[in-house]
Image: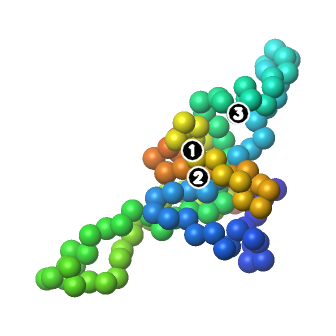
Amino acid sequence: MLSVTEDNRLKKLLVVGDRVLIKPKNPSDKTTSGLYLPPTVAEKEEVQSGYVLKVGPGYPLPGLDDDEPWKSKAVKYMPLQAEEGDVAIYLQRHAVEIQYEGERYVILPQSAILLLERAEDLF
């Protein structure tokens, strides 16, 4: 399976804001009735699934703790629900496909994720 390790090449990537980096699962190339589909048809399905590899810091929060919040230099974030290692089911129309070092990934906002599956023994 996929895993993000210290020596992994993805550690150079920083995901920004509420975005999530996902490695898409290989879509099924066969229908339930047994017909084989070309890759272009399977990739254009509205709902896809994949492995969450990296997540951004989250939604920035205003610094309302101080009397003068505009002087605060530290930015606080509300963390995302998605975590590295989750399996995500997401809307394909919100995904931006990228190629990085020969691999295909998608970046999408957390709002495009419909469901997360989190298992301790997934990886």
Sequence-wise first label, 2 or 3: 3
In this picture, residue 78 sits left or right of residue 82? left
State the residue in front, 47 or 98. Answer: 98
User: Could you tell me which secondary element the residue under label 1 belongs to?
Assistant: loop
Q: Crowding at label 2, few (<14), some or many (≥20) Cα neighbours within 10 Å?
A: some
User: Could you tell me which secondary element the residue under label 3 belongs to?
Assistant: helix
Contact between marks 1 and 3 (CB within 8 A): the answer is no
Which residue is at 46% across, 58% downward? Answer: 18
State the residue in front, 27 or 40. Answer: 40
Residue reaching furthest to the top: 33
Question: In which quadrant of the rendered view does residue 41 lie?
Answer: top right
Which amino acid type is marked by label 1? Ala
Q: Which residue is mark 2?
A: 107
Question: In which quadrant of the rendered view does residue 89 lie?
Answer: top right
Alpha carbons under labels 2 and 3: distance apart: 15 Å
Sequence-wise first label, 1 or 3: 3
Contact between marks 2 and 1 (CB within 8 A): the answer is yes
Q: Is residue 57 visible?
A: yes
State the residue in front, 28 or 16. Answer: 16
